[in-house]
Structure formats: C-alpha cells, structure tokens
Amino acid sequence: MRGVFASHQSVRPLLSRRESLALGGVALGGVAKPLLAGTSSTPVATEGLTFGKAKSVIVIFLGGGPPQHETWDPKPEAPAEIRGGFGTIATQTPGLHIGELMPLTATLTDKIAVLRAMVTGDNAHSSSGYQMMTGTPHIPLSVENAVSKAPNLAPHWGAVVKYVRQFESQPRQRALPPAITLPTRIANTGEVVWPGQIGGILGPRYDPWLLTCDPSKPNFSIPDLALAPDLSQARFEDRLALLDQLNRQNDGLKDAAPIAGFNRQTQQAIELLGGGAARRAFDLTQESEATRDRYGRTQWAQSVLLARRLVEAGVSLVQVNWCRVEGEPNGGSWDTHDKHNDLLQRYLMPWMDRAYSALLTDLAERGLLDETLVVWVGEFGHTPRFNPRAGRDHWGHCFSIALAGGGVRGGVVHGKSDAHAAFPVSGRVEPRDLMATIFHCLGHAADQEVHDLEGRPLPISRGQVIREIL
C-alpha cells in the first residue's frame, strides 16, 4: 500500500521500534495519543497562516460533473460551440460574472471563493472521483468502473476526519458519528460503487456512516434510530442496566483491543437509540415550511437541509451526494452527454442554485457559516466543445469548484483558465491541495500523520494549502 498517499513523492519511513511499542501501548489501552494524532499534540499551521475556524464541513458533491462554462467560469467571448446556450450575470462581487442559471448564488458570492483551475487530469467518473474525495490520484488514471481495491485504498476525507477527531483533547459532544454520507453512495450504472468512499487503508472502523434516505418524504424517519416495535423504553433501560452490570463484572477485559472496539460500537448504538439529540437532528418537521420550501422539496435538496441539521448536532463532515432522477437521461446526474442545455435549464441548475444558496443563507443567518466550511465540487468538469448529441463530455484537465465559510475569504477568484476553459493559465490546484486546505480549515496541518492498519505513518495530504483563498 506504499503508493496510496505517495502522489509524486515517496512515503515516509516506517515506524521505528520505539514508535511501534508506543503504538502497541495505545492498542492495549495506553495514552500515547500524540503519536497517533500526528508528530506532536499541537499541529503547527502552515508558515504565515493561522488555522481556519471550521468545526464542520459540508461537501456538496455533484456527481457527473458540473460544467465550468455554465457555472463559475463562463466564456461569453468564445465561439457558440464553446460558450454554450446561456449568458452570464453580474454577482455580488465586483467584476465577477457567473452563468445566468445561478441567479440566487450570484447574490452570495461575497461569501464564496471560486477556484477556476482545478485539475485531476482524469476523464473517468470513478477514478477522478476517487482523486477528488481522497486527494490521491488513482493508479492508473482514467479507469471507468474502478472499485475499492489495492493500490487505490486512500481514505475518504470523512474517514480522515473521523481519525483525527478521535484524538482531540476536548472532543465535541456528539451522539452521531463524526462523518456521514447521504442520501446515497456514488456509483456508476449497475451499482458499481466508486472507490474513495470508505476508510481504505485506515480500516473499516473509519468508514463514514452511509445513510441511504429520502428526507423529502412526508413521514421521513431513520429506521435505525428507532427501537423495535416490541421493545418499550422501560425494557430498553432494563437491558442497559443489565449490560452495565455485566461490564462491571468483566472490567479486566474491557481494555483488550477487540473488546474495546466492540464497546465503542455498542456505545454508539446506545446513543443513537436512546439519545434524543440524534433523533431530533433527523426531525425535519422542526423546520418551518418556508425554510423547507427555500431549499426545495426534492430528495437532494432536503438532504442538503438535513446536512445543516447534522452539523448543528455535532457531525464533523457531511457529504451530500447528488441523487439520480428517474426517467431522465444519464439517470438525472450531471453527466450530460446528451441534451446538455435542456437538462441544465430544466432542473439541474435550478435545483442546485436553490438548495446551495439556501444552505449558505441559512448558515449565515444562524451564525454558523464562519465555523462551517461548505465545499461545492464534482469529480470533474465538461469538455469545451459540444459533441454531436448536443452534450458535453468528461473533462478533468480544468474545471471549477467553490468554497465558502470556515475561514475561507469570500469574494475571491483564484486561478484562471484559457479562453475556452480547457486548461489552466494560472493558479492550478489539484485535489491534494483541496484536501490540505480542508484540513487546514479544520485545524490540522497537511503533514499531520495518520497510521494505516500496518501502523505506518502517512500524512493527511501531500498538497499545499491554497493560501490565496484564506
């Protein structure tokens, strides 16, 4: 697995004998947290920068690839076959114009940093998506229908959040897992699940919690958070008392690694079943009808609203994946090989613009935007030229993403593409740089170490923090 985090550099040396013994001590219930959490107990910020304010991250992942031309990087002076069928609109940021199908977002660009030169160099959904979610290029590039297997087992950013947050000296009080993915996992046609959505080399205990759900349904609830129909609250509490009695009788075993792992899972299950905070986080009926309408009543839009409630409840990272839309070309995703303009205008852009702008507004009004980093991404962009089917194809050589909140400076445009939005001219950014920046905003240095299942130390990212947007 040496190549997983390697990128263009070699990995660091393996653990010394002394470090291995210390790591073993932790596995047996020791307290050598600084070793696991990084090279020191207090991460050092990138020179000249202070760490961001983010306590949580919401990732808006637009599967299929949002097009750069119709969103953040329009080219109104380009030929029609490049610029497409839509114009541009002015924004809250002087001099910044974006696609005309984003009117609500245009009023909020003072809160947003736009990056116009993101590059994966990969034109396949699954392998480029793997790189975006892990900060590590797939080996090899441009492999469609790739799955999670060696050497491509870099951990999802949610898995890394789970790893580093467990060693905080003052962990956030939470009844929910630190990382949640909803409302569905990302997969190619035939349910070929993309790599990069699990704990990978960190192990399955760091997998983000996958919550398959439809929050737009009238009677939405999470079955896993409810007691069995024949189990009353009184009986549940009796069982907890019995469990506590058994645990006291077996105190000598509690620190053994397998028992400790089981106890963690048991405690989390108890908190989810018995804790009102967890259930309240999923109760969208507590939101006003006006708020729910502001996001939109689709499965995806209500999932974005749910993400806001989850970070309020203490979840550190929520990834909201775009949902398929039955009966639409390409499954309703942003993979617009056919009828590109029609699909964008009819529902893709309006749904996105509405929910994304509602999220930013909602967070700002609640005083949460400064401590919540919102990441707007897809796995790649789209080709400069239209194909014969009136669609745009895959393009990982230059595309746009956007960040807001959590210490990011709004009203900023970083990076420039050429006249056709085909290749970077300046300000090139790679997914590893995005990974470094996300964790910098969360208060973790890019070179802070995590350890794989073999105990080998690996940095969170080998990228560079994007200083220009902080």
Image: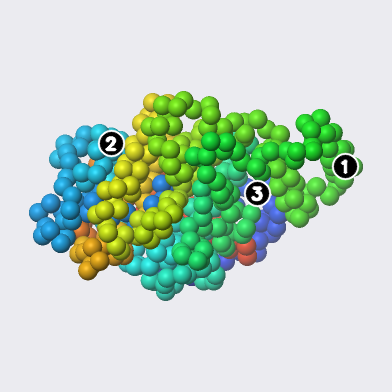
Residue 255 relative to residue 44: left or right:
right
The answer to which quarter of the image holds residue 178 is top right
* Mark 1 vs mark 3, CA separation in Å: 29 Å
* Mark 1 vs mark 2, CA separation in Å: 57 Å
Q: Position of residue 204 (x, y in %)?
A: 62, 58
Task: Give the residue drawn at x 71%, y 34%.
Answer: 274
Sequence-wise, the earlier of marks 3 and 2 is: 3
- Provide the residue designation for mark 3: 32
- Provide the residue designation for mark 1: 246
- Provide the residue designation for mark 2: 104
Nearer the camera: disc 3 or disc 2: 2
Sequence-wise, the earlier of marks 1 and 3 is: 3
Q: In the picture, which quadrant includes the N terminus? A: bottom right
Residue 197 in view of the camera: yes
Question: Quick one: SS at disc 3?
Answer: loop
Residue 334: numbered disc:
none
Q: Amino acid at mark 3?
A: Ala
Q: Position of residue 165 (x, y in %)?
A: 56, 44
Question: Quick one: SS at disc 1?
Answer: helix
Q: Amino acid at mark 2?
A: Leu
Residue 171 in view of the camera: no
Residue 96 relative to residue 61: left or right:
left
Nearer the camera: disc 1 or disc 3: 1
The answer to which quarter of the image holds residue 292 is top left
Taking depth in this image into account, of 55 and 468 the one nearest to the observer is 55
Q: Amino acid at mark 1?
A: Leu
Crowd around label 2: few <14 · some 14–19 · many ≥20 (10 Å): some
Dot 3 and dot 2 residues touching (CB under 8 Å): no
Task: Give the residue drawn at x 38%, y 71%.
Answer: 142
Return the residue found at the far front.
327
Crowd around label 3: few <14 · some 14–19 · many ≥20 (10 Å): some
Q: Position of residue 301 (x, y in %)?
A: 42, 41
